[in-house]
Image (cartoon, rainbow, N blue to C red):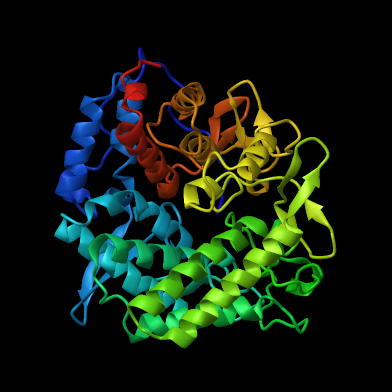
Amino acid sequence: MGGALIAPSVMAATDKTIDFKSMRPVREKRCFTSQSVDKLIKTVKSDMADTELAWLFENCFPNTLDTTIDFEYIDGKPDTFVITGDIDAMWLRDSTAQVWPYMPLIKKDKELRELIKGLVFRQTKCILLDPYANAFYKDVTKISKWKSDKTKMLPGIHERKWEIDSLCYAVRLANEYYQITGDTSIFDEDWQEASRLIVQTFKAEQRKDGTTPYTFNRTTGQMLDSPVHWGLGRPVKPVGLICSMFRPSDDATLYPYLIPSNVFAVLSLRQMADIHTNIIHNHAFADECQTLADEVDKAIKKYAIVEHMNYGEIYAYEVDGFGNKVFMDDANVPSLMSLAYLGAHQPSDALYKRTRAFLLSKNNPYFLQGKATEGQASPHTGQDNIWPMGIILRAMTSTDDDEITKCLTMLKKTHAGTGFMHESFHKDDASKYTRDWFAWANTLFGELIVKLHNERPHLLKRTL
């Protein structure tokens, strides 16, 4: 989800020129208020030595709650709709990621718990509407900007780009909510039907018979807006992997087997297997989830872990089953960098360490170095733009204090005086950036700071 480059009214600044006044909306204009979140902000800020970094945290961490939440009760059940920011639609991926940093607080915060529960219910409705869609409207009468896309655009759909990770994020949210609260009421008949639809969709997109019910074509000037071959994507050899026509950046894949998303699918299928075994007691479906997870995992090990001329065996980003592969990464999550963040690997795992070394090298075509800073990019914003999200994930997956401090310094110097993270910025001039209001990046930055406060508090006691 991108936008045109924007020249902000406030240019990159220093402590001497920024007025560190809170950039949050006044309390009465906030979409949702959580006392536990506000309390956590005060606690963390009081332990931070760097004034500017603390100001960024105060602005960014609550940005999802402050600006993107539509919460109400419908037929006696909580319902939460979360827009992505400057695009007035809800992505399954973004909405989960946006609220994720608040999850540790829901055990003791009833209102926040109801908000998350409402989002699980809302995401379930979205999946039941169309498991292939990635973004939705709450108002089903709203006409999408992409209504002319050549695909099955139902009322209530903003965009219908098939991305494996969309369904994985919904499972991730429901599973985490249950793990924290012990509340099994979310796993109602609708959720169970949605979980069956997820598995059905994953299996269809293994394309073992060479067919798929999904096609997508969009008429734009951007090549990455549609899969090739009239919306079907490049050919694949059916090997057990799942095709994803789009990346989490919403760009079309080069080769349909997108590896970070397949790894994510394995995690989600195992979570669904556990839920259906221990809570729903549908052992037949649990076995189906587990069997599919094992099949995809086996195929990942066989076809996606490949020899790189400089780094030995590492993960390819995309493959096709015929032996073709692409070595790169995209700053959006799931990415190869984020595999340790998502829980698929420990940062110390040898395969992950080799892959990570490649990702942070000049051998990765989307690792950029410029006058402003260095970092991972995305084809979504071209060859010159670095993503704060990539820098944040680098810090979150690092075990080295110096590297983490370097990442914090880069984030501090590239927000262009706005007090918020952006989608991307030009590698040579951070004042040229995309998206003023990108809640996922803001909240992810807040998540990083809370993680450091819990695990490496000494890093926040430094002035950068």
In the displayed structure, 51 sits above or below 241; it is above
User: Which quarter of the picture shows residue 133?
Assistant: bottom right
In the displayed structure, 111 sits above or below 133; it is above
* Spot occupied by residue 169 in the image (x, y as percentages of width and height): 46, 63
Residue 215 seen in this snapshot: yes
Foreground: 297 or 373? Answer: 297
In the displayed structure, 369 sits above or below 91; it is above
**Residue in the picture at 53% in, 53% down:** 344
* Spot occupied by residue 308 in the image (x, y as percentages of width and height): 79, 42
Foreground: 176 or 117? Answer: 176
**Residue in the picture at 62% in, 36% down:** 385
**Residue in the picture at 41% in, 86% down:** 282
User: Which quarter of the picture shows residue 230?
Assistant: bottom right
User: Which quarter of the picture shows residue 148?
Assistant: bottom right
In which quadrant of the rendered image does the N terminus lie? bottom right
Q: Is residue 303 left or right of residue 447?
A: right
Q: Is residue 248 left or right of residue 143?
A: right
Residue 129 seen in this snapshot: no
Q: Is residue 249 left or right of residue 34?
A: right
* Spot occupied by residue 66 in the image (x, y as percentages of width and height): 27, 49
Count of labels shown? 0
In which quadrant of the rendered image does the C terminus lie? top left
* Spot occupied by residue 70 in the image (x, y as percentages of width and height): 28, 63
Foreground: 183 or 99? Answer: 183
